[in-house]
Amino acid sequence: MNRSDYFNFIEAKFSTLGYRLALRGGLNILDLNLHSENFYLHFFNLLFGWKLKNLNTVNQNAAGIDLIDTTNKIIIQVSATVTKQKIESALAKKLSKYTGYSFKFISISKNATDLGTQIFSNPHNLVFSPPNDIYDISTILKIINGLHIDQLKEVYEFIKKELKTEPDPEKIESNLTTIINILSKVDWSKVASGHEKVPFEIEEKISYNHLDTARTLIDDYKIYYSRIDKTYTDFDKQGVNKSFSILGGIRKEYLAVCSNNSPDQCFYLIIKNIVQIIRASANYTPIPGEELEMCVGILVVDAFIRCKIFKNPLKT
């Protein structure tokens, strides 16, 4: 299910970020704290449609607040310190010019559930409801989990760009080798194969097939083309044409889903279906889901480049 795939990815990235912020904070390494201000600025603008700006870019160390939305009258403090004293200290700053604004507090690393039940001194009478205006990773994930699928996908794409991690090339190669070995043993039942001979530009093919959200994935994974080619060549030298079988299998999945789905949906369904085939294989040794999906994505992008899936704009 796409919803669970999107949410699981988002949850993993938020949890990792929170853990790293707490760990590095204990070591007094605070660079991620500063970057988190801008991360949450853009994230909350996307999530709630706000127009937050970073006040620290205008006024370094602005008293009590980090982010401001003058249109919706919102001020926010972003902090790794999660105590009643921290919030009351922020509320006690020189904030009289923000009377009528809503004050919100974002905990970037620690659970803040207990603070939602407490009463706070609020000398400037800012609009502040602790149960609703104190956010931590848990409360943010609850909001995300209830989003419409289209907005959930937007959040997923945003998190993927903001919190992307560079994979270990050696681990990728090892996983790809395992996955190719598994897929080569699948009975794809009379799948026509053969490599496309008509050349094309990747960007032109992406546009021609109206691949909008999949464009990012293709751009990310196209760099692995030569690595896949080497792996296929090594396997084929053993006397079993594994590239023929696997590329044909990916094409079979493409033909099965392309007629009833949009181009982007089709692209991601191919990946999802291949992942399910691998997980159901008797000789599959489980690897983290994110790594498996990435490796299958690389294989599907490779099939796209070889023109086994989607239309070639130059083919007559």
Image (cartoon, grey):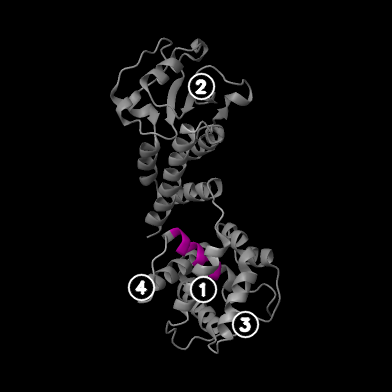
**Residue sitting at 52 percent across and 77 percent down?**
251
Question: If you read the primary sequence from the N terminus, does the residue marked by circle 4 or circle 1 appear first?
Answer: 1
Asked whether residue 168 is in view, the answer is yes
Magenta span: predominant SS is helix
Q: Residue 274: which disc?
A: none
- Mark 4 Cα-neighbour bin, 10 Å: few <14, some 14–19, many ≥20: few
Image position, residue 76 (x, y; %): 48, 25
Check disc 4 and report the residue beneath it: 280
Q: Is residue 262 visible?
A: no
| Residue with the mark numbered 2 | 65
Quadrant position of the N terminus in the picture: bottom left
Question: 85 left or right of 265?
Answer: left
Of the residues shown, which amino acid type is indicated by label 1? Answer: Thr
What's under tag 3, amino acid-wise? His
Q: Residue furthest left?
A: 117
x and y percent of residue 129 in the render? 35, 23
Residue on which disc 1 sits? 177
Mark 3, residue position: 195
Q: CA distance from mark 3 to mark 1?
A: 21 Å
Looking at the rendering, the stretch of residues picked out in magenta corresponds to: 290-300
Name the foreground residue: 230 vs 243: 230
Q: Are marks 3 and 4 in contact (CB under 8 Å)?
A: no
Q: Of tags 3 and 1, which is closer to the observer? A: 1
Specify which label sits upstream in the sequence, 3 or 1: 1
Q: Taking 73 as reference, is 45 above or below it? A: below
Task: Provide residue 137's location: percent of width, then percent of height.
Answer: 40, 38
